[in-house]
Amino acid sequence: MVDQILVGAAIGCLYALIAQGFALTFRTTHTMNFASGEIGAIGAFIAVGLAGAGALPAPVKLAVVAVVVALIGAALFAVLIRPFVTNDGHDARWLLVTVAMSLVAVDVLRNSQGTQHRPLGFAQLDGVFSLGFAQVPQQLALLAVVCLGLGVVIALVVTRTSLGVRMRAVAEDAETAGLVGIDSRRIGMLSYAIGSGAIAIGATLWTGYVGVFPDMGPLLLVPAFAGAVIGGLVSVWGALVGGILYGVADQLFTYWLGTAAGGVIGLLAVVAVLVLRPEGLFARRQEVKV
Amino acid sequence: MPARTPMPARLRPWAFPLLVALVAGIAIVYTTDGSGVRLSNNQQIGQICAFLVATTGLNLLVGRTGMHSFAQGGFLAIGAYAFVWTQLKWDAPFLVGLAVATIIPALAGVLIAVATTKMRGPQLAMVTLIAAVVIFKVLSEWKPFGQFGGYPNVSAHGTSLIEPPSLFGWELQPPLFGGTPATALVPVIVLAALALLLYRRLVGTTWGLSLSVIKQSELLAEHLGVNVYLRKIAVVSLAAGMAGVGGVGYALVFAHLQPETFALMLGVNLIVMVILGGSGYVLGPVIGTAAIVYLQTAPSVASFVRWENDVISDRWYLSAQGLIAFLMIAVLFAMPAGIVGSAARLYRRWRPRTSAAATTSWDGDDPAAHLFGEEAVPTELVVDGVGLAFGGVRAVDGVSLTVVPETIVAIIGPNGAGKSSVVNLISGVYAVQGGTVRLGGDVLQGVPSYRRSRLGVARTFQTPILSPDLTVTDNVLVGSEQTALGSCAGAVVPTPSSRRRHQRDLLDVAAALELVGLSEVAGRTADELSYGQQRLVELARALVSRPRLLVLDEPAAGLNPTEIAALATILERLRGQGLSILLVEHHMDLVRRIADHVVCMIDGRVAVAADADTVLADPQVVSAYLGHGHLETTGDRHA
């Protein structure tokens, strides 16, 4: 069972990283990318393409993947999402656009790459990492370390640096932030770039374990949602904790009850958390102003 | 723009039902003649009608209430499986199956609504998406539902098609076999027609209007006496029930269920159907559903994909689902109101809506006496030692005040003194931390806003909250008691007494509009009015509920001197009817003219409370407004 907890926590680190991307962009733009899973898939397929490309070391290939996908993320935000950024909480056009983006991406990936699983071809560790009392596949350990490291760095940047201060200023009030010279469009693009690049790295390492295939998006999106809502949607630290929590819970329920019942109960537990604490476990309730 | 709530065109009462009946009749005659040539057409029509019930329900959520749910496809699946289950296990009559398949998803909808009640925007979408995934997992992975063989399947049930159910002795044959009339399409088409009639009927009622109010502002809805929690549960479960009916239609058309059909994609496509067609318009889902089903099934789309392969690439191309998504993005950019919405706008440009068609005009004597004459019981508001802190800041600190019937009490004070917070404590936006609030014999503290509204508290807001594209009459009508207390079933089935009540409500609206001087513009939409007029609409909306206590937050802000004078006259008339009136106000001329008692707040406390002249001359008040060093200044006295 300790093995199960560790495996769950490792995959949970990936969920956490994606959930953090939601929190990051939701803070700065009041939008989030429902196509995040497909962003990961695009990154993984670019990585497959790079696998054959000469003698570049694996970290460099991953960095190239991250940069390319970060640019894609920023461009998608600027072109497709930003036109629908408003203060109206009921205006969900951005959401529909990102959902549609994910469908277009899946469709194109299926048509061009086929639906079969492919090996990633690099950055793969086959061994098992032993802690004495428990064992984890090395690929998952790598995934956990990289995702958690990225997540912590991003969280520190957001909470501790002047860039983070500017992001928070935009999050509070984009218009006023604009008056003091903060370009909310650039901050938004940056948030999307960071989120997308991080997801690309995490998803690529994950596909080193499960293989690369076009339909991986929902497998990442739904657990990341679960992590984000548990974490409170606006907290970059909360998202990290929420993602890992959900990863562990999902793994344990699946271990005990099988994939069908276990997966369902993990998600129902998330809904139960929301009933009890709609603002999530780690975010403070916001006061309404009249 | 997207917060728009289109109202249906005003037609004669029989016109829309007649049109729907006509189209449905033609569809039935066309589909049931039994010729084999039309099999695929019949399936398309059946599928469109089945989905249409679900998308019309979804339209109530997305278009009316502003809730984006991806779970509608899941509810449809629940309905379909429940129906087939009743047929396989119980051999149940069609109507029993239909009822079960409606009720189970509706109950699931209640669960979702309870879980999401405090959520807004993306959180709701995320949870409904999670729900859709859960439902799909259960149906596709749990053994009883047949897994990859579909439901029913040969190995578990001995057949891959359900027996045709019978209705009133008729066998409902699916459109699967040439030469057999597709009788199953009759109930499917009829159910779709009923869904459209239900939708159009609902949105015109106060119950339907209350959904638009929730979409506009949940806070406002609460203050109009609407129990937002229960109403959201009602509308979500109604929509889910309609999805279940759609599922029955789907099961009738195909007589077999394949779990893949009900993956998350279905929920996404149902939303696309609503938005593409035009959310909030009764015909929106009709166009959207037909368009998407056509894209998914029509041979011409397959040839378009072949064309893509020839001209662009045989690897990098979009197939049907990608094309649908691409179309969705294009529509969101180019036609945010959807196909029907854009068409409606073009039509309105060509032929603007004639106003004031359905408004009742006031021809009685004294509208104030009509509203407050007999029933109103004069009631005293007593606020005693209430406090409120935000973090470490004490916004309100031990404030006490009393509003006696037939008086106007004004709260004045510099910005940030806590005036609006006091108002918010009285109307229930914030919970008091210590102290009591009583209205007559009723205790208000600890009571939710919607109950305070029902106990007789009505208020206006600093910035008016109106639905911009509802008419002035409708904006005021939502203030009436029926909005808060009316039931969905009562809204759908008109009874003589409900008709009479509606007429009375319209008369009250006319009286309130006459009282505030807006009778002339009753038929205009709210966004056509000046700011001052919009504030008066809010006042009229507060009045139709016949409040015992009227609370006004800076009613004169943004009004010109003429409008302020008119406002003063209105408030004096209301005072004459025995109302207790509390206002927060900065216009000292207005305060001096109408206020019987003035409370000046400074830094969350009551600094001075007395008659207007005394308070305005008080050195503390003067220095609070003007700062120290202006102590000699006294207010001008030309009011």
Image (tube, rainbow, N blue to C red):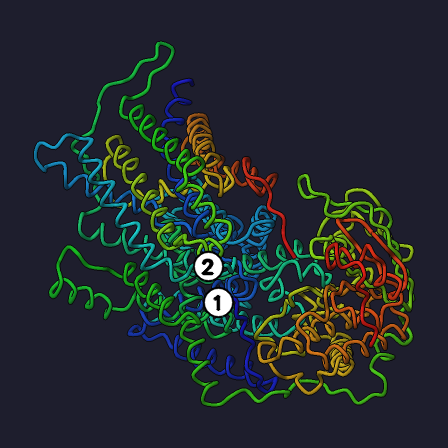
* Figure check: A82 above or below B49: above
Q: Residue furthest left?
A: A54
Residue carrying label 2: A92
Residue A174 in the image, given as x and y percentages of width and height? 46, 54
Residue carrying label 1: B2
Identify residue type, mark 2: Ala
Residue B289 in the image, given as x and y percentages of width and height? 40, 68
| Residue located at (80% from left, 76% from top) | B568
SS assignment at label 1: loop
| Residue located at (33% from left, 67% from top) | B330
Q: Is residue B220 left or right of residue B27?
A: right
Task: Using the image, name the chain to which the residue with label 2 belongs.
Answer: A
Q: Dot 2: within a 10 Å radius of its alpha carbon, few (fewer than 14), some, or many (20 or more) residues?
A: many
> Residue B466 or B376: which is nearer the viewer?
B466
Residue B425 in the image, given as x and y percentages of width and height? 76, 52
Quarter of the view holding residue A227: top left
Residue B533 in the image, given as x and y percentages of width and height? 67, 78
> Residue B17 or A221: which is nearer the viewer?
A221
Quarter of the view holding residue A60: top left
Tell me whether circle 1 and circle 2 mark residues in contact (CB < 8 Å). Answer: yes
Task: Using the image, name the chain to which the residue with label 1 belongs.
Answer: B
Q: Is residue A103 left or right of residue B425?
A: left
Q: Residue furthest top?
A: A132
Residue B43 appears in the rendering: no
SS assignment at label 2: loop
> Residue A172 or A219: which is nearer the viewer?
A172
| Residue located at (74% from left, 59% from top) | B625
* Figure check: A207 above or below B514: above
Residue B213 appears in the rendering: yes
* Figure check: B47 above or below B601: below
The dot on residue B210 is none
